[in-house]
Amino acid sequence: MGQPPKLYNTAKQKLLEGKQVFSFTQSKADPAAYCEAAKHYDYAWFEMQHSTLEFKDVEAMIAACPHSAAIPMIRLPDAQEWHIQHATDIGALGVVIPTVDDVERAQEAVKWSRYPPVARRSAGSGQATKIWGVHGIDYRQTFNDNMLVVLMIETPTGVANAYDIARVPGVDVVIIGNHDLSSFSGFAQSDDRYQMLMTKVRDDVLRAGKIFGLANATYAKGNPLSKDARFFQNGPSNDGWTPPARGGARVDTNAPPSGEGPR
C-alpha cells in the first residue's frame, strides 16, 4: 500500500512526523506584518482571547497571503459553535481552546471542529473553500484530516482531569497554559509543585496517545519536558528571521496584551 498523501496543514504534518512546531502571535489587524512573519514560522497563532481582533480582521489577514508557510490557527475565547464555525469558515486549519477543565468542554470543542459524520460542523460559504480547495483538492472531504483541535490546560482542575480530557476522540493536541497554570495554582514556575503539575499533564497526554505541548516556548530547551513537547506558542522561526522593528528581542510580531507567550 502507498503512503497517504501529505496534508496541506503542514504544521499538522510535521507534528505527525514527530517534529516540533512554533508560531508567532498575531494580535493586531496588520496584514503586511502578518504576511511577512508568516513566511518564517510553522503556524500563526491569531490571538482572539486576549485582544480586540475580530473575525473580519483575521479573515482579511488570511486572505492577504493565503498560502504562506505559517498555517493559520486561532485561539478563541471559548468553544462555542459560532466561534469555531467562523474560525474554520474564514480559513483557519486549527483552533486553540483555552481553560479546558473537564471532558464536557473538550467534547464541545471537538463537536463543532469537523464535518459529519465525526462531528457537527455545518457547510458554509466562507473563504476557506477557495483557499484550501485548490489544485483538485476537495476541501469538504479533506478538511477533517487537516484540522487541528488544540486544548489548553491552565488550572489545577484541568490538571486533575488531563487524561480524560486528552483521550476525547477528535482532540489532537493538549498544551499547558504555563502562565495561567502558575496563576491559578499559586505556584511559581520554578516551584517543584508547579513542575509536578506539568509532569502530570505531560504523562497523561502521552498516555492518551495525543500530542503534548507548551504555551511558553522558553521550555523548548533545557527543560526535562522539552523532549516530549512538540507544539509551542511562539518560539524560533524556521530560518532565523526576527521582526526588524523589535531588534530580535522577541519572535512574535504583535505581543498579546496578556496570554501565554514568553515574557
Image: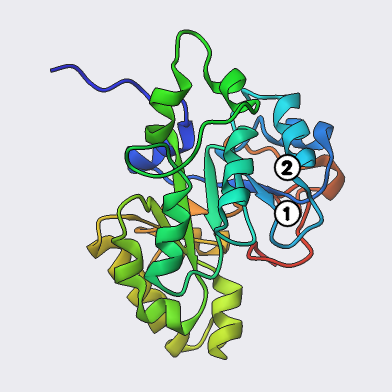
Q: Is residue 53 left or right of residue 126?
A: right
Which residue is drawn at the image coordinates 57% and 22% (left, top)?
A: 129
Q: Which amino acid type is marked by label 1? A: Arg
Query: Are the residues at dot 1 and dot 2 in contact (C-beta closer than 8 Å)?
Result: yes
| Residue at the far top in the pictured view | 136
Is residue 7 among the parts visible in the rendering?
no
Distance from the alpha carbon under mark 1 to that under mark 2:
7 Å
| Residue at the far right in the pictured view | 245
Q: Nearer the viewer, residue 130 or 177?
A: 130
Which residue is drawn at the image coordinates 57% and 57% (left, top)?
A: 80
Which residue in the protein does label 1 denote?
250
Q: Is residue 236 left or right of residue 155?
A: right
Locate residue 69: give its quadrant.
Answer: top right
**Helix or strand or loop: what does disc 2 sit on?**
loop
In the picture shown, does residue 127 fall above or below 95?
above
Which residue is drawn at the image coordinates 73% and 42% (left, top)?
A: 242
Q: Position of residue 43 (x, y in %)?
A: 57, 40
**Helix or strand or loop: what does disc 1 sit on?**
loop
The C terminus: image quadrant: bottom right
